Amino acid sequence: MPHLLEVVGRLAIQGIELKLDQLFVGRAGPKQALSRLLEASKPAPLAPTTWMIDGGHARPASEPRRLPEPPLEWPAHVQPTIVPVGTPAGNAATPLNGFAPQNGNGRQASPAPQQTRMPNGAGPDTGNGRFDAAVATQFQGLMSRFLATQRSVMGQYLAESPAAPLPPAFEAATPQLNGATNQPSGANGAPSPHGVQAAPATIPAAITRYSVQPQEAPPHPGQVRLAQGVVVISADDNGAAEILQQRMHALGQRALLLDPAFPGEPEVQLAELRQKHGPIVGLFYLAPLRNAADLPTMPLNAWPARLEAETTGLYRLLRALAADLNTAANNGGAAVMAVTAMGGTFGSAAATAFLPLQAGVVGLLKSVALEWPHVLVRAVDLERQLAPQRIAEYVLAELSSTADRLRSGMWRDAA
């Protein structure tokens, strides 16, 4: 818009006759009087229930904005003194609370007897309810030791290196309560003037790490139970889909291959198959096996197209087949199976490189299994080096299996 105005202005300066009416053709905006333009362009007033929120405050829009509070200033009669963490009470020139009260002559008064507050209230008090510098210093020291401990533990967890020893100051700054009296205790159970008790802090010798490991799953052979109708197969590029189609025909089950080059939407192709061959009772999704040899070297900018072809493609097929599959499930049986190539272990212990975004296919089937409880849902993961015959055999074995499992894989070609 600024460039257009600049060009129009330059043309006008050169004395060129301009016909600007064409800029407003088709624009049905209301006409505004110049005298009321400022008032008409004001933003609409906020609703009465609107709240204004910033980084530190929240207020109704009807209330005036609060001015920032003035910074904290020390009283004239008090001088803050920082007491190092772990300094004994009897060895400090000032009281434990960190203040040095002044008498009338400007000299430091003698330390007064200390009072120890309960930890759920505040730390040692000055007697006038003011801020306690020593408690704040002690708290900061404790947090520093905590962060050092956290860094040591995480370093051991990630790098499996021995944890660094804790500084001695950590023990002196670790508060601990006596469970029987809920009072701070010192040596021999006597009240401690610090309100803390030396409590040795330790780090576990070993950090437990959980990981998913594949387990041997015995076969559970059974019978294929599908309603009367056809199953559709989303083909791979290695011949496994054609072999699977032949094996199903041998079992008396009609099977059709989806055309990956179909010019229309998948819903249109399914509608044509449904009109010609009857209801669809199963979907076998082998599309993730296409170009499996290229998975380890696939560039990152090619991932979106692959995700669209695999996970999004499966979603669109399932959405188009929702009515067919749920009807078939109530009339004899329906099945949804998808095959991925993540090493046969769903990526948890793959011996070769794989494409992690194929996990989206498995995640989608998890949702399908919850939403369609009467449909047989299986996610099958295989090594990409498996022969097409073995892929077809394993898919059929899972189709007829009576095992109650969603995911299964085969990571070695055992003849």
Image (cartoon, helix red, strand yellow):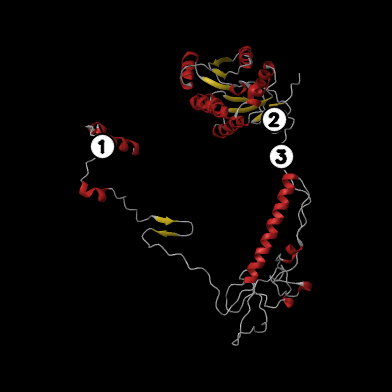
Q: How crowded is the residue under tag 2: few (<14 C-alpha within 10 Å), some, or many (20+)?
A: many
339 or 395: nearer the viewer? 339
Residue annotated with mark 2: 345
- Left of 24 or right of it: where is 245? right
Identify the mark at residue 211; answer none if there is no mark: 3
Furthest-front residue in this view = 14
- Left of 247 or right of it: where is 61? left
Quadrant housing residue 126: bottom right
Q: Nearer the viewer, mark 2 or mark 1?
A: 1
38 or 130: nearer the viewer? 38
Residue annotated with mark 1: 13
Tell me whether circle 3 and circle 2 mark residues in contact (CB < 8 Å).
no
Q: Earlier in the sequence, mark 3 or mark 2?
A: 3
Query: x, y (%) of residue 390?
Result: 69, 18
Which three-letter amino acid code belongs to the residue tagged 1? Ile
Q: Is residue 198 above or below residue 268?
A: below
Q: Earlier in the sequence, mark 3 or mark 1?
A: 1
Q: Is residue 32 above or below residue 239?
A: below
Quadrant housing residue 305: top right
- Left of 329 or right of it: where is 150? right
371 or 25: nearer the viewer? 25
Q: Quadrant of the N terminus?
A: top left
Residue 53 at least partly seen: yes
Which three-letter amino acid code belongs to the residue tagged 3? Ser
Q: Is residue 324 above or below residue 91?
A: above
Query: x, y (%) of residue 353?
Result: 68, 28
Residue visible at 72% across and 35% down?
Answer: 213
Residue visible at 66% across and 78% down?
Answer: 115
Q: Earlier in the sequence, mark 2 or mark 1?
A: 1
Q: Is residue 152 above or below residue 81?
A: above
Query: x, y (%) of residue 91?
Result: 74, 76
